[in-house]
Each structure stands twice: as structure tokens, then as C-alpha cells.
Image (tube, rainbow, N blue to C red):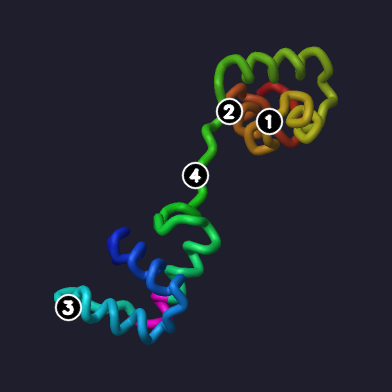
């Protein structure tokens, strides 16, 4: 794992039109106590910088979205089903502006059969 400081140095040197091998040599001389990344690692660090605009390693990772399952949405779902029973989960998802997965989970929470919406 390389420090952010080291990655910034790699990007700076590589961006100044030095070759991969020249950057490799500069790193070996600048950080003699640390292992030097191979040229493919140097290239990957630079490409990630060009793609994302930063050297943060976690920049590209997705974060989980917050689940929608709450009492208000559950009540809306139950009210909607009681109002108009022959609804598909897809239609419910569209009307409530939530995902079909959330509809399935809410139906399960409310003790409904999701394949044929009826109460247990």
C-alpha cells in the first residue's frame, strides 16, 4: 500500500513526461527504505488519477444506498394494496417511487405474499 504522498509524487513525476522507468528510479532513490512499486503499479496509479482526479484508493467504490423500509412507506403500501388489490409489484414500485426489491421486502414485513399479493 502506498501513501497518498507517494502517489501524488508518482503522478507529479509521471505527468511531467518522465517515462515509467524514470519514475521508478526516482522512487527508488527518494524512498530507499520502502519497496518500490513496479512500473505497472505506477501506470495504474496514474490512470486512476486521470480517471477520477484524485489518488484516493476508495474513490471508485460504491456506497450502499440507505434502505427505504420505514413505517410511512409500509403504511402507504398497505393502503395502496387495500385500495386496489390486483396490483403488480412493478406497478407498486413505480407508484411509490421505490425499487421492486424494496416492495418485496415491505410486503414480506407486512405479511403479504409477494407472488400473489394477499395477506397471510
| Front residue of 86 and 91 | 91
Region in magenta: 38-42
Q: What element carries label 3?
A: loop
Residue drawn at point x = 17 percent, y = 78 percent: 32
- Magenta stretch prevailing secondary structure: helix
Determine crowd level at label 2: few under 14, some 14-19, many 20+ residues with C-alpha closer than 10 A.
some
The span from disc 3 to disc 1 (Cα, nearest Å) is 54 Å
Q: Disc 2 vs disc 3: which is toward the camera?
A: 3
Which numbered disc flags the more N-terminal residue, 4 or 1? 4
Q: What element carries label 2?
A: loop
| Badge 2 vs badge 1, beta-carbon distance below 8 Å | yes
Q: Mark 2 points at which residue?
A: 68
The span from disc 4 to disc 3 (Cα, nearest Å) is 37 Å
The span from disc 2 to disc 1 (Cα, nearest Å) is 7 Å
Which numbered disc flags the more N-terminal residue, 3 or 1? 3
Which numbered disc flags the more N-terminal residue, 2 or 3? 3
Tell whether 4 sits left or right of 19.
Answer: left
Q: Point out the image quarter for the N terminus.
A: bottom left
Residue drawn at point x = 62 percent, y = 24 percent: 111
Residue drawn at point x = 55 percent, y = 21 percent: 70
Task: Say the numbered circle drawn on residue 63.
Answer: 4
Q: Disc 3 vs disc 1: which is toward the camera?
A: 3
The span from disc 2 to disc 4 (Cα, nearest Å) is 15 Å
Amino acid at each position: 500500500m502506498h501513501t497518498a504522498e507517494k502517489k501524488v509524487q508518482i503522478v507529479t513525476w509521471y505527468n511531467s513526461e518522465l517515462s515509467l522507468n524514470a519514475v521508478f528510479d526516482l522512487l527508488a532513490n527518494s524512498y530507499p527504505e520502502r519497496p518500490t512499486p513496479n512500473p505497472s503499479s505506477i501506470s495504474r496509479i496514474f490512470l486512476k488519477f486521470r480517471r477520477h482526479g484524485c489518488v484516493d484508493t476508495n474513490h471508485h467504490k460504491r456506497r450502499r444506498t440507505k434502505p427505504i423500509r420505514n413505517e410511512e412507506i409500509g403504511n402507504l403500501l398497505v393502503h395502496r394494496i387495500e385500495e386496489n388489490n390486483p396490483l403488480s409489484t412493478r406497478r407498486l414500485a413505480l407508484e411509490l417511487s421505490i425499487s421492486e426489491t424494496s416492495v418485496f421486502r415491505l410486503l414480506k414485513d407486512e405479511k403479504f405474499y409477494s407472488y400473489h399479493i394477499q395477506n397471510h
